[in-house]
């Protein structure tokens, strides 16, 4: 593995809960985690040797996460410009033991750990690997009322992705009651009553 | 015929999935250039060190898939997936290799799942199957 010139720390200081894997091939490559305060963190796989897998762990803002999911921001930008100005690099063995925990500025990371500049999220492909709970999380994340108002342009652009999530969910006994609160509280047949809102029928109930 | 990882998956519901068929099909897999590399034909949950940082494989569906081999139905689909992965994960070659091997899978090899729309499918191998003997490296993804 590459030599890391960071500040070594005794113990990984965060207590994070797994939310979902965003990039997956024969195991996770990019995973979303959350702490008790609701802050999101990304685990990014970057290297391996005979004993350890190496991960870069860093906090990500809600907006940056949305921008990444909506292909407005590349993964490289998230890693190069982390919210906290630094990232953790940890080596994790088969027993999930953390070793060689260090804190490092992003600009000191080896070049091979930085994704390409056009590393935009390929949701269409990754959807195939997600379970129902993860699809619902994405659906909720992508189509909450604020997001729709904030970035209608992108929602429309990626409508096919949302439709694909819904289509796949339907094959898994998805029902409207499973809809995230942000949609279910704005029933489709009543959307005209929501001033300045886009047509929910148009977007989500096109059938 | 029993499955190679029967003991690990026997208690998992619907494993292999009911879509699992034993058909004859061309298949393509990411491998290391050396066909004898220890990880070339091992499922994710058998490879050491495991690329697991979460409880992902505690879910039955993922655990089942973790004991299967990832394959693609066409060379094009395999290349497309690799190129996309490599944009985000430059060192992907260190964990899944940087070549593609191809071979004909038939009913004597195990059960295959239905390919998804990107051509990816799983093979649950039978006990005495050694794909290394049926596959050969046909494509270099390394760009070297």
Image (cartoon, coloured by chain):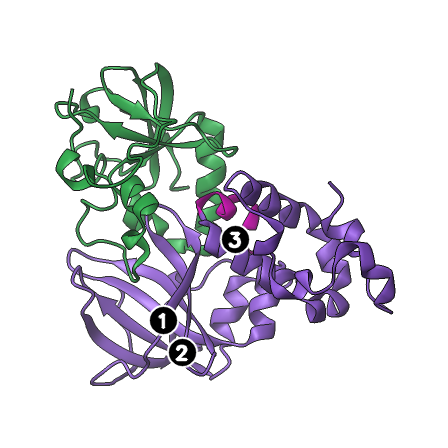
First in sequence: mark 3 or mark 1? Answer: 1
Q: Nearest the camera: A119 or A64?
A: A64
Main structural element of the magenta stretch: helix, strand or loop? Answer: helix
Report the residue at 34% width, 14% height from top: B24
Q: Callout 3: few (<14), some (14-19), or many (20+) C-alpha neighbours within 10 Å?
A: many
Q: Is residue B25 above or below residue B143?
A: above
**Does the CB distance between marks 2 and 1 fall below 8 Å?**
yes
The range drawn in magenta is A121-129
List the residue tagged with mark 1: A17
Spatial CA distance of label 2 from label 1 is: 6 Å
List the residue tagged with mark 2: A35
Which dot marks residue B128? none
Q: Inspect the magenta stretch and tell me whether residue A86 lies in it.
A: no
Q: Position of residue A60 (x, y in %)?
A: 50, 75
Spatial CA distance of label 3 from label 1 is: 18 Å
Q: Colour of chain A?
A: purple
Q: Position of residue B103 (x, y in %)?
A: 31, 20
List the residue tagged with mark 3: A135
**Does the CB distance between marks 3 and 1 fall below 8 Å?**
no
First in sequence: mark 2 or mark 1? Answer: 1
Q: Colour of chain B?
A: green
Q: Callout 2: few (<14), some (14-19), or many (20+) C-alpha neighbours within 10 Å?
A: some
């Amino acid at each position: 593995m590459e030599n890391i010139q960071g500040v070594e720390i005794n113990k990984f200081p965060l207590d994070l809960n797994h939310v979902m894997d965003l990039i997956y091939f024969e195991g996770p490559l990019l995973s979303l985690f959350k702490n008790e305060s609701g802050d999101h963190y990304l685990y990014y796989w970057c290297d391996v040797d005979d004993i350890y897998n190496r991960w870069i762990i860093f906090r990500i803002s809600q907006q940056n996460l949305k921008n990444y999911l909506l292909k407005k921001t590349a993964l490289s930008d998230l890693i190069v410009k982390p919210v906290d100005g630094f990232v953790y690099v940890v080596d994790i063995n088969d027993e999930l033991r953390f070793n060689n925990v260090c804190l490092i500025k992003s600009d000191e990371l080896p070049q091979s750990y930085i994704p390409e500049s056009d590393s935009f999220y390929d949701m269409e492909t990754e959807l195939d690997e997600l379970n129902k709970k993860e699809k619902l999380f994405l659906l909720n994340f992508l189509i909450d009322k604020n997001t729709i108002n904030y970035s209608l342009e992108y929602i429309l652009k990626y409508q096919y992705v949302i439709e694909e999530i819904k289509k796949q969910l339907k094959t898994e006994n998805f029902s409207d009651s499973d809809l995230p609160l942000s949609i279910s509280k704005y029933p489709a047949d009543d959307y005209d009553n929501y001033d300045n809102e886009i047509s929910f029928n148009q977007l989500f109930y096109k059938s | 015929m029993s499955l190679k990882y029967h003991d690990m998956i026997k208690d998992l519901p619907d494993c292999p999935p009911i879509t699992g068929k034993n058909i004859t099909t061309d298949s393509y897999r990411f491998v290391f250039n050396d066909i004898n590399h220890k990880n070339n034909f091992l499922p994710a949950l058998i490879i050491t060190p495991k690329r697991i940082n979460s409880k992902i494989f505690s879910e039955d569906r993922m655990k089942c898939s973790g004991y299967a081999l990832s394959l693609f139905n066409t060379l094009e689909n395999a290349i497309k997936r690799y190129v996309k992965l490599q944009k985000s994960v430059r060192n992907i070659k260190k964990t899944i290799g940087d070549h593609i091997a191809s071979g004909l899978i038939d009913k004597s090899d195990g059960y295959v799942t239905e390919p998804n729309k990107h051509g990816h499918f799983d093979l649950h191998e039978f006990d005495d199957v050694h794909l290394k003997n049926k596959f050969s490296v046909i494509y270099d993804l390394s760009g070297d």
